[in-house]
Amino acid sequence: AADGKPITLLLKNIYGWPFALSYMASKIFVSFGMFNLIMAVYLENTLHEARMEGAGNLQQQRRESIRIAKQTKRLLKKFCALQRPESGVGFEATLRRASLLEIHKSGMHISKDEF
């Protein structure tokens, strides 16, 4: 309006209380709808990031299991070397000589399930 009065007040004066009540109801409806839309976008982004982080954790767990398997393989190699001590050879030299090839020749096989 030219004199600065709110247009909703002018329309209420022309059309009465039904307009004012329907205007307030539609304003509340739109406000709640916008709030719901904003919250839905926020939640969707949060859940997407959580899923992506979960995939990263899965890869990290796989890397950790491979690291542990390698350490176990080295330990097994040392045990095999200790089971067949050679006369006159020190403990350290025996450990250094144990190789994966010797473990393979001994017929020992450890599957993923046994590990």
Image (tube, rainbow, N blue to C red):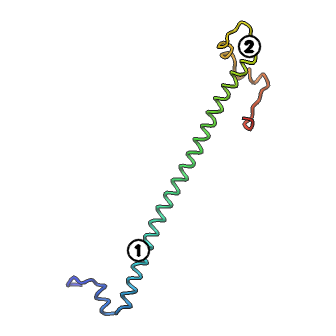
Seen at 37% across and 89% down, the residue is 19
* Point 40% across, 86% down: residue: 22
Q: Residue furthest right?
A: 107
Give me the residue at 67% from left, 29% from top: 72
Position of the N terminus, as image quadrant, is: bottom left
Q: Amino acid at mark 2?
A: Pro
How dense is the environment of label 2, judged by Cα within 10 Å: few (below 14), some, or many (20 and up)? Answer: few
Q: Does label 2 or label 1 sit earlier along the sequence?
A: 1
Number of on-image labels:
2
The reply to whether the C-beta atoms of the residues labelled 2 and 1 are less than 8 Å apart is: no
Left or right: residue 4 versus residue 65 is left
Circle number at residue 85 = 2
Asked whether, in this view, residue 1 is left or right of residue 102, the answer is: left
Looking at this rendering, what residue extends furthest in the top direction? 88
Which of the two marks, 2 or 1, is nearer to us in this view? 2
Q: Which residue is mark 1?
A: 31
> Residue flagged by tag 1: what amino acid is it?
Ser
Q: Where is residue 74 shown, x and y percent of the image?
A: 66, 25
Residue 35 drawn at (x, y percent): 43, 69
Q: Is residue 110 above or below residue 53?
A: above
Residue 108 position, x and y percent, is 77, 26
Q: Quadrant of the C terminus?
A: top right
- For label 2, the SS is loop
Q: Which residue shows up at 45% across the image and 73% down it? A: 33
